[in-house]
């Protein structure tokens, strides 16, 4: 198969890269753009470490081809902070100690941010929060600190700076 | 009792690596790319036991894009092991020359310009094997007629351990009631989110640099130097952020070794990353154990004697397994006083993946058997399980005969707290029960099987002209937050702010040697070294303060919040940063530098200090399906003086999730030596929706051996949970399940057996 041109926006920046059509989105992000914040933790779309936002939706970037994202807008963990200011979810993760080794954290932050965005101001139940991050494995924290962090943001305790 | 009022200790502090971790700036070995880097892949044995007749790599070497292939013949053929004081326990050649002993064992490695080419080239390597008979279970492997896995090792017995105190037979004579049970404890995979990964770069100066995820950069430096024939000082191990460890990342692994061998052959950087499947089949696991437990008690519940025999599935090699063999036997006695205690452990080689240390280090298995049997004994004799635990539990100042001295011990308070909590729940609905389990754990193993000539922990601190502090430590932050803990201890000791401390760790070229993150040792051992280094630096600073302030030498001076002052009259003093500038001038420009170290002496056989805890699990079981729903896991915990409450809560919640996984979800089934679930679809770890609330309370103790009174937290709490859940199942349905994990199938089977027994009556 011939290589193809992929034009897409990542964290607000326009990119044009020349890729093999079977390149996965996670490979394009990590290997072609050098944005290594996004991780890979399995080969079976099970762990969520590679979760990124595609046009506002949470997507496991090992499960889609990069070329399927032609013209789309991607947000990775590196795109959550704005001009050195952390996003509400990032701040809540810090305050609640919602990470330890940090390897699942980029994917977990994206899933959490998408979940918060989709609430449109509604305050979720504990189980709704848990379902929102069910696709992301964290081996260190036991999730409860992450749930507290998301809950704090959903309760409006953190404001966008 | 906390003896001092602290400035920073015991206040919640953000993880000092937190900003890096929540913004994607934190780079792991997995993220490292070096100029001209090649990618390596490993060819693995499809046989559980086979002789290697020949390996033909010629076709693979000629494949376009391949730069080199390594087999055992490219190595020095040294048998290595982390118990390097004992030659017979150094039994593993990564890339073996003669035999493979488990499915997944590396036999060759390829370096190519892309990972894809390297993987394709693996298919072009021809290995001729003579398949040998294999054995997978320790109780089979120990039989006379079983195949020999390591030449000269009779009955495949790798290591034995005997622990005994008191007159055991006499103590059994005193017992009114004796109970015997057999247990089977499963393996568990560490399942670190970052799989095994290394980037090795060997240069013409004869120096090797290895970027890797590790629990001890120093161990890996020593192990690599030994097996590659290099001087230790010519090997630099850089541990960037490490994506989890849990006991699985301090032995030498094939990613580290094979990338180093290929890089030394090719003079190019080589990166090897295990796939999740490779990580599952060939990166070791928690040791599966068979336990026979015989316990004698008096009518009133006083413990008399215990005698246990344990056979563990060691897998193909020794690794850290020899330590787990000792610790499981010791902690099987914990946290109780036994008049007589006898343990005989046999670690048996089998043709399965090697077993090693994992969070709890053998204690979760030993305590599962002990704590369930205690509840069953209580039921047999009509005794109160809280009262029996209180009656026999460790107390401050107790000596485990010939083994350990117990300093601080908050066990009784922990039992009281959990009893209060459980009784407040009142009567539970049908099929729901609360199970309890007491436990304790070490605060830093005092073992030196690695035979290091360095102190166990060291720290160097230097103070910059503006008062900022460079702290150099060899302890390894694998996510548990040791960098933050050391920064807190340094800031508290020096009297500066936490943001003044820069922690340098994870680089053997720049940091002092430290045994690393295992056996819950860093807070106590590295923490004491950091405290000593900072006290050394502070003393030097205060010498100048006495001169500068011209005060009576019997006055006490201290620094707090960057203010140097007379203790009795805190308003009289000077700014810390001014003192630092003056001290620099006074020392002819030499920086203030403090040094500290920790090497345990006269601390018993195991550890300088012990944490204690009591846990309760509230669980509901569907008797139709056998499915378990866990409502809550409650812990009362004694870790001495907490250093960082935020980090502490994280450690305890994380331990609860990993231990619950061990109790009822995680399993590693093998068929003919082949792991049947080497992926995250079939290997079940706890997910967010399954994790129950897991609150904890700290009881107030102070440990003399620990820095500022601190003890272990986070590893020990992996120990009680399997027993507590099993006891909940016992109290809910009357089932005595003696095999882990407690799956729906096992519950249904036990229910059917119970019904059949009742029908017979």
Image (cartoon, helix red, strand yellow):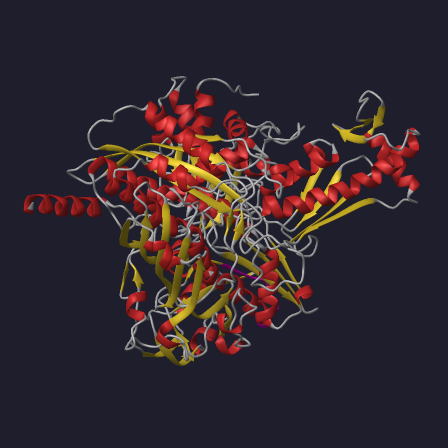
Classify residue B548 as left or right of residue B728: right
Q: Is residue B647 above or below residue B143?
A: above
Front residue of this view, candidates B603 and B446: B603
Classify residue B644 as left or right of residue B718: right
Q: In the image, residue A106 lies at what x, y percent?
A: 49, 38
Q: In the image, residue B257 lies at what x, y percent?
A: 53, 65
Q: In the image, residue A118 lies at what x, y percent?
A: 38, 24
Identify the image quadrant of residue B143.
bottom left
- Please report the bounds of the magenta region as a residue range: B265-272
Q: Is residue B411 above or below residue B743?
A: above
Measuring 62% from the left and 58% from the top, which residue is drawn there?
B218
Front residue of this view, candidates B388 and B583: B388
Residue B291 in view of the camera? yes
Front residue of this view, candidates B177 and B106: B177
Measuring 44% from the left and 77% from the top, which residue is drawn there?
B57
Classify residue B2 as left or right of residue B93: right
Q: Quadrant of the N terminus of chain B?
A: top right
Based on the picture, tell me whether residue B300 belongs to the magenta stretch.
no
Q: Is residue A54 above or below residue B592?
A: above
Q: Quadrant of the C terminus of chain B?
A: top left
């Amino acid at each position: 198969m011939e290589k193809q041109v992929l034009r897409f926006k990542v964290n607000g920046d326009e990119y044009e890269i020349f890729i093999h059509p079977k390149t996965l989105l996670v490979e394009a992000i990590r290997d072609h753009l050098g944005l290594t914040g996004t991780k890979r933790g399995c080969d079976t779309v099970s762990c969520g470490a590679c979760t990124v936002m595609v046009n506002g939706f949470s997507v496991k970037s090992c499960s889609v081809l990069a070329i399927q994202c032609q013209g789309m807008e991607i947000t990775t963990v590196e795109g959550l902070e704005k001009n050195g200011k952390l996003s509400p979810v990032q701040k809540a993760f810090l305050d609640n100690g919602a990470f330890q080794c940090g390897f699942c954290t980029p994917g977990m932050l994206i899933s959490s941010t998408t979940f918060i965005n989709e609430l449109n101001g509604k305050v979720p139940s504990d189980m709704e929060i848990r379902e929102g991050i069910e696709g992301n494995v964290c081996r260190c924290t036991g999730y409860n600190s992450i749930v507290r962090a998301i809950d704090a943001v959903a309760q409006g305790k953190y404001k966008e700076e | 009792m906390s003896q001092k009022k602290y400035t920073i200790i015991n206040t919640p502090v953000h993880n000092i690596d937190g900003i890096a971790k929540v913004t994607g700036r934190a780079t792991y070995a997995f993220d490292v790319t070096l100029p001209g880097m090649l990618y390596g892949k490993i060819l693995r044995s499809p046989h559980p036991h086979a002789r290697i007749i020949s390996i033909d790599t010629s076709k693979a070497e000629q494949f376009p894009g391949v730069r080199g292939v390594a087999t055992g013949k490219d190595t020095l053929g040294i048998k290595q092991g982390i118990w390097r004081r004992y030659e017979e326990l150094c039994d593993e050649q990564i890339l073996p020359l003669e035999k493979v002993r488990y499915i997944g064992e590396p036999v060759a490695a390829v370096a190519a310009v892309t990972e894809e080419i390297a993987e394709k080239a693996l298919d072009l390597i021809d290995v001729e094997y003579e398949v040998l008979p294999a054995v997978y279970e320790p109780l089979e492997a120990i039989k006379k007629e079983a195949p020999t896995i390591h030449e000269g090792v009779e009955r495949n017995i790798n290591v034995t351990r005997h622990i005994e105190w008191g007159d055991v037979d006499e103590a059994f004579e005193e017992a009114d009631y004796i109970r015997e049970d057999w247990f089977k404890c499963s393996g568990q995979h560490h399942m670190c989110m970052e799989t095994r990964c290394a980037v090795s770069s060997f240069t013409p100066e004869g120096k090797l640099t290895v970027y890797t995820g590790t629990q001890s950069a120093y161990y890996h430096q020593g192990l690599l130097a030994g097996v590659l024939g290099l001087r230790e000082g010519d090997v630099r191990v850089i541990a960037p952020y490490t994506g989890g460890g849990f006991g699985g990342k301090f032995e030498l692994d094939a990613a580290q070794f094979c990338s180093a061998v290929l890089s030394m052959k090719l003079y190019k950087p080589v990166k090897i990353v295990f796939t999740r499947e490779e990580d599952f089949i060939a990166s070791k696991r928690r040791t599966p154990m068979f336990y026979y437990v015989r316990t004698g008690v008096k009518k009133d519940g006083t413990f008399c004697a215990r005698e246990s025999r344990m056979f563990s599935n060691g897998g193909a090699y020794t690794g850290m397994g020899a330590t787990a063999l000792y610790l499981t036997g010791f902690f099987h006695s914990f946290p109780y006083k036994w008049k007589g205690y006898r343990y005989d452990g046999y670690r048996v080689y089998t043709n399965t993946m090697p077993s090693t240390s994992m969070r709890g280090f053998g204690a979760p298995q030993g305590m599962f058997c002990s704590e369930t049997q205690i509840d069953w004994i209580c039921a047999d004799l009509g005794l109160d399980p809280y009262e029996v635990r209180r009656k026999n539990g460790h107390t401050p100042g107790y000596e485990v005969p010939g083994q350990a001295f117990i300093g601080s011990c908050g066990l009784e308070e922990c039992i009281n707290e959990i009893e209060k909590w459980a009784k407040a729940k009142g009567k539970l609905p049908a099929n729901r029960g609360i199970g309890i389990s007491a436990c304790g754990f070490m605060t830093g193993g005092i073992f030196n099987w690695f035979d290091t000539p360095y102190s166990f922990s060291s720290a160097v601190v230097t103070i910059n002209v503006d008062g900022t502090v460079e702290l150099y430590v060899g302890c390894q932050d694998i996510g548990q937050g040791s960098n933050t803990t050391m920064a807190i201890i340094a800031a508290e000791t020096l009297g500066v702010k936490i943001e003044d401390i820069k922690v340098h760790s994870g680089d053997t070229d720049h940091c002092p040697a430290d045994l690393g993150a295992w056996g819950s040792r860093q807070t106590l051992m590295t923490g004491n070294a950091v405290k000593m280094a900072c006290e050394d630096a502070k003393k030097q600073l205060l010498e100048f303060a006495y001169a500068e302030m011209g005060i009576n030498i019997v006055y006490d001076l201290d620094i707090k919040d960057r203010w140097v002052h007379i203790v009795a009259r805190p308003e009289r003093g000077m700014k810390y940063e001014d003192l630092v500038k003056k001290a620099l001038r006074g020392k002819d420009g030499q920086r203030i530098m403090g040094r500290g170290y920790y090497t345990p002496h006269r601390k018993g056989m195991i550890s300088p200090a012990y944490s204690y805890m009591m846990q309760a699990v509230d669980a509901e079981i569907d008797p139709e399906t056998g499915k378990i729903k866990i409502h809550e896991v409650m812990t009362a915990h004694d870790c001495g003086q907490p250093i960082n409450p935020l980090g502490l809560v994280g450690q305890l919640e994380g331990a609860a999730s990993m231990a619950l996984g061990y109790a009822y979800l995680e399993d590693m089934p093998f068929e003919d030596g082949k792991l049947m679930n080497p992926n995250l679809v079939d290997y079940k770890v706890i997910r967010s929706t399954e994790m129950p609330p897991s609150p904890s309370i700290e009881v107030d103790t102070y440990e003399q051996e620990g820095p500022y009174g601190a003890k272990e937290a986070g590893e020990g709490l992996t120990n009680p949970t399997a027993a507590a859940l099993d006891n909940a199942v016992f109290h809910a349905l009357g089932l005595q399940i003696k095999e882990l994990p407690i799956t729906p199938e096992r519950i249904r089977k036990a229910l059917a057996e119970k019904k059949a027994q009742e029908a017979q009556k």
